[in-house]
Amino acid sequence: MGKLLRTKMKILELLERRNMTVTELSQFLQVSPSTVDQHVKELAGMGMVERIESEFARKWKYYTLARPVKDEMQRNPPIMILRKTSFG
Protein backbone atom coordinates (compact mmCIF):
# COMPACT_ATOMS: atom_id res chain seq x y z
CA MET A 1 0.00 0.00 0.00
CA GLY A 2 1.36 3.38 -0.98
CA LYS A 3 1.99 6.28 1.38
CA LEU A 4 -0.76 8.42 -0.20
CA LEU A 5 -3.33 5.68 0.22
CA ARG A 6 -2.26 5.10 3.84
CA THR A 7 -2.62 8.80 4.64
CA LYS A 8 -6.11 8.94 3.17
CA MET A 9 -7.05 5.77 5.03
CA LYS A 10 -5.82 7.28 8.33
CA ILE A 11 -7.81 10.46 7.67
CA LEU A 12 -10.97 8.39 7.20
CA GLU A 13 -10.25 6.45 10.39
CA LEU A 14 -9.76 9.66 12.38
CA LEU A 15 -12.92 11.25 10.99
CA GLU A 16 -14.85 8.12 11.86
CA ARG A 17 -14.11 8.90 15.52
CA ARG A 18 -15.11 12.58 15.41
CA ASN A 19 -15.19 15.70 13.26
CA MET A 20 -11.80 17.36 12.98
CA THR A 21 -10.03 20.37 11.48
CA VAL A 22 -7.09 20.13 9.09
CA THR A 23 -4.84 21.29 11.94
CA GLU A 24 -6.06 18.52 14.23
CA LEU A 25 -5.64 15.91 11.50
CA SER A 26 -2.12 17.13 10.75
CA GLN A 27 -1.17 16.85 14.43
CA PHE A 28 -2.45 13.28 14.66
CA LEU A 29 -0.79 12.29 11.37
CA GLN A 30 2.39 14.31 12.02
CA VAL A 31 2.39 15.80 8.54
CA SER A 32 2.01 19.41 7.43
CA PRO A 33 -1.43 21.03 7.34
CA SER A 34 -0.97 21.73 3.62
CA THR A 35 -0.45 18.00 2.97
CA VAL A 36 -3.56 17.12 4.96
CA ASP A 37 -5.52 19.87 3.20
CA GLN A 38 -4.63 18.38 -0.18
CA HIS A 39 -5.72 14.89 0.91
CA VAL A 40 -8.96 16.22 2.40
CA LYS A 41 -9.74 18.11 -0.82
CA GLU A 42 -9.17 14.92 -2.82
CA LEU A 43 -11.39 12.92 -0.45
CA ALA A 44 -14.06 15.63 -0.67
CA GLY A 45 -13.83 15.51 -4.46
CA MET A 46 -14.52 11.77 -4.27
CA GLY A 47 -17.56 12.46 -2.06
CA MET A 48 -16.00 10.77 0.95
CA VAL A 49 -15.71 13.73 3.33
CA GLU A 50 -17.64 16.95 3.75
CA ARG A 51 -16.82 20.31 5.25
CA ILE A 52 -19.11 21.36 8.07
CA GLU A 53 -20.33 24.92 7.90
CA SER A 54 -20.92 26.47 11.30
CA GLU A 55 -22.20 29.93 12.08
CA PHE A 56 -20.50 29.72 15.47
CA ALA A 57 -17.09 28.61 14.28
CA ARG A 58 -16.43 30.36 11.01
CA LYS A 59 -12.74 30.51 11.78
CA TRP A 60 -12.46 26.72 12.04
CA LYS A 61 -13.40 24.44 9.20
CA TYR A 62 -14.36 21.01 10.44
CA TYR A 63 -14.55 17.93 8.26
CA THR A 64 -16.70 14.86 8.67
CA LEU A 65 -17.27 11.61 6.83
CA ALA A 66 -20.00 11.76 4.21
CA ARG A 67 -23.08 9.77 5.30
CA PRO A 68 -22.63 6.97 2.73
CA VAL A 69 -19.01 6.51 3.86
CA LYS A 70 -20.05 6.39 7.53
CA ASP A 71 -22.52 3.64 6.66
CA GLU A 72 -19.98 1.77 4.53
CA MET A 73 -17.35 1.91 7.29
CA GLN A 74 -19.75 -0.04 9.51
CA ARG A 75 -19.33 -2.95 7.08
CA ASN A 76 -15.88 -2.51 5.54
CA PRO A 77 -12.46 -1.15 6.54
CA PRO A 78 -11.32 2.16 5.00
CA ILE A 79 -8.89 0.43 2.63
CA MET A 80 -11.76 -1.41 0.94
CA ILE A 81 -13.75 1.80 0.58
CA LEU A 82 -10.80 3.67 -0.94
CA ARG A 83 -10.16 0.84 -3.38
CA LYS A 84 -13.76 1.07 -4.59
CA THR A 85 -13.25 4.73 -5.55
CA SER A 86 -11.49 6.12 -8.57
CA PHE A 87 -8.45 6.68 -6.33
CA GLY A 88 -7.88 3.00 -5.64
Image (cartoon, helix red, strand yellow):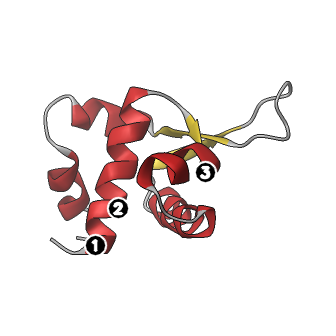
36 on left or right of 2: right
The residue identified by callout 3 is: 22
Residue shown at 61% from the left, 51% from the top: 22
* Marks 2 and 1 close (CB-CB < 8 Å): yes
Q: Compared to 38, does 16 lie above or below?
A: above
Q: Is residue 86 visible?
A: no
The C terminus sits in image quarter: bottom left
The residue identified by callout 2 is: 7
Q: Position of residue 35 (x, y in %)?
A: 54, 69
Residue at the outermost top position: 56
Q: Quadrant of residue 70?
A: top left
Label ID, residue 3:
1
Q: Quadrant of residue 57?
A: top right
Residue in the foreground of this view, choosing between 17 and 43: 17
Q: CA distance from mark 2 to mark 3?
A: 13 Å
Q: Earlier in the sequence, mark 1 or mark 3?
A: 1
Residue in the foreground of this view, choosing between 81 and 4: 4
Q: Is residue 21 visible?
A: yes
Q: Number of marks in the image?
A: 3
CA neighbours of label 1 inside 10 A, class few (<14), some (14 to 19), many (20+): few
Q: Earlier in the sequence, mark 2 or mark 3?
A: 2
Q: Position of residue 7 (x, y in %)?
A: 35, 61
Q: Amino acid at mark 1?
A: Lys
Residue in the foreground of this view, choosing between 14 and 49: 14
Residue shown at 47% from the left, 27% from the top: 18
Q: Compared to 41, does 66 lie above or below?
A: above
CA neighbours of label 3 inside 10 A, class few (<14), some (14 to 19), many (20+): many
